[in-house]
């Protein structure tokens, strides 16, 4: 039953999961409940057109959470964790298409490396490299995780576009997402298991393991907020790599997952791709310059005492591009 609902607040699943700060300037005073209610009434109900825009990403986040449950039910945890990094690829592609962003050569190369690593892991999974439960269907799991990555990328970029095109704060946008996500989750729950809920109660089947999943989703959303606010893409890349390693170790200990050379190669490529993609602009320039300087021997040396010749500008929009905002990539 837990998989039918939102599986955690939309703010926890989406890239806008930023901790609530202060309210809009001049609209409320800290601790004044009356002003808070008036502000929310004005922002959510009176300006309903602006609120309705959030229905699209909220619906997609709710769908995405349910797809993740389907995927993790049909794939080993380590395989799911590696494959789910495709959300970086989909987010990048939607950012190029919807926000007219351009990627550096290093970022394009890292995305190709990411896709190759995921393909190797899926090939290992399809080849039966490790034993799996009889009730798992790798084809269904792969389809679910790919659909989840597509929805994650689109919703994240759409949400960022809304944030940039309006004056509403991230705090308010998360509240609007939560309202729609809760409503859509309840509708989905009633549609799928309304009779069971009416007879057995809403919290029937909420075992300690289920509560653990719910709390983990909520806590994970808060952690995403902290990373977005206080960390950078480098730390995000290390965190993603660490999550893959920990998921693999836990799968070995808990489910008897077998790590063969093919899986290790694919996972290593994914970890390397995440790190390269997360490099800041300065580091990307340094790597590009180093690769250019080592591509061939120097054919001309400047005579002593002569000033160096002027360098031609090579701004083609590929190296000096603005990196993605962390909230576009930090998708749970």
Image (tube, rainbow, N blue to C red):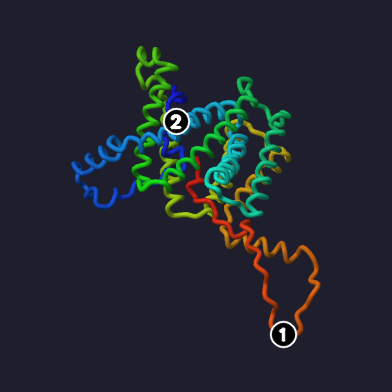
Q: Nearer the viewer, mark 2 or mark 1?
A: 1
Write the residue at 39% across / 12% down: 195
Which numbered dot is residue 59? 2
Give 9 or 58, whichever is nearer the viewer. 58
For mark 1, does the 10 Å Cα neighbourhood hold few (<14), some (14 to 19), or many (20 or more) residues?
Answer: few
Residue matched to label 1 = 306
| Residue 231 x/y as whole percent | 47, 54
| Residue 102 x/y as whole percent | 59, 51
Write the residue at 45% across / 17% down: 192
Residue pushed farthest bottom?
Answer: 305
Write the residue at 60% across / 61% down: 283
Give 306 or 88, whichever is nearer the viewer. 306
Q: Secondary structure at mark 1?
A: loop
Sequence-wise, the earlier of marks 2 and 1 is: 2
For mark 2, does the 10 Å Cα neighbourhood hold few (<14), some (14 to 19), or many (20 or more) residues?
Answer: many
For the N terminus, which image quadrant?
Answer: top left
Q: Secondary structure at mark 2?
A: helix
Quarter location, residue 217: top left
- 63 over 269 or under it: above or below: above
Q: CA distance from mark 2 to mark 1?
A: 65 Å
| Residue 169 x/y as whole percent | 35, 47
């Amino acid at each position: 039953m837990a998989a039918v609902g939102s599986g955690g607040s939309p703010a926890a699943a989406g890239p806008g999961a930023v901790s609530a700060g202060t309210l809009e300037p001049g609209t409320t005073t800290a601790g004044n409940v009356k002003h808070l209610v008036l502000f929310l009434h004005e922002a959510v109900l009176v300006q309903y057109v602006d609120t309705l825009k959030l229905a699209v990403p909220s619906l997609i986040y709710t769908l995405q959470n349910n797809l993740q449950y389907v995927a993790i039910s049909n794939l080993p945890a380590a395989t799911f964790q590696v494959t789910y990094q495709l959300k970086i690829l989909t987010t990048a592609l939607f950012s190029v298409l919807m926000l007219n962003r351009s990627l550096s050569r290093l970022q394009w190369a890292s995305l190709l490396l990411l896709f190759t690593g995921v393909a190797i892991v899926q090939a290992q999974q399809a080849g039966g490299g490790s034993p799996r439960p009889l009730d798992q269907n790798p084809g269904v799991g792969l389809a679910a995780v790919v659909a989840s990555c597509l929805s994650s990328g689109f919703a994240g970029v759409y949400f960022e576009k809304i944030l940039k095109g309006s004056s509403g704060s991230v705090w308010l946008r998360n509240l609007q997402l939560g309202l729609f996500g809760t409503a859509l989750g309840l509708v989905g729950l009633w549609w799928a298991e309304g009779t069971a809920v009416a007879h057995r109660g809403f919290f029937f089947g909420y075992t300690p393991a289920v509560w653990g999943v719910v709390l983990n989703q909520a806590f994970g959303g808060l952690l995403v907020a902290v990373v977005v606010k206080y960390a950078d893409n480098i730390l995000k890349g290390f965190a993603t790599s660490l999550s893959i390693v920990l998921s693999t170790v836990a799968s070995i200990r808990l489910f008897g997952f077998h790590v063969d050379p093919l899986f290790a190669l694919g996972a290593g490529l994914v970890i390397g791709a995440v790190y390269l993609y997360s490099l800041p602009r300065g580091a990307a320039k340094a790597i590009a310059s180093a690769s250019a300087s080592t591509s061939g021997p120097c054919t001309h040396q400047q005579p002593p005492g002569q000033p160096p010749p002027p360098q031609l500008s090579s701004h083609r929009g590929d190296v000096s591009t603005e990196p993605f905002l962390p909230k576009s990539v930090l998708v749970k």
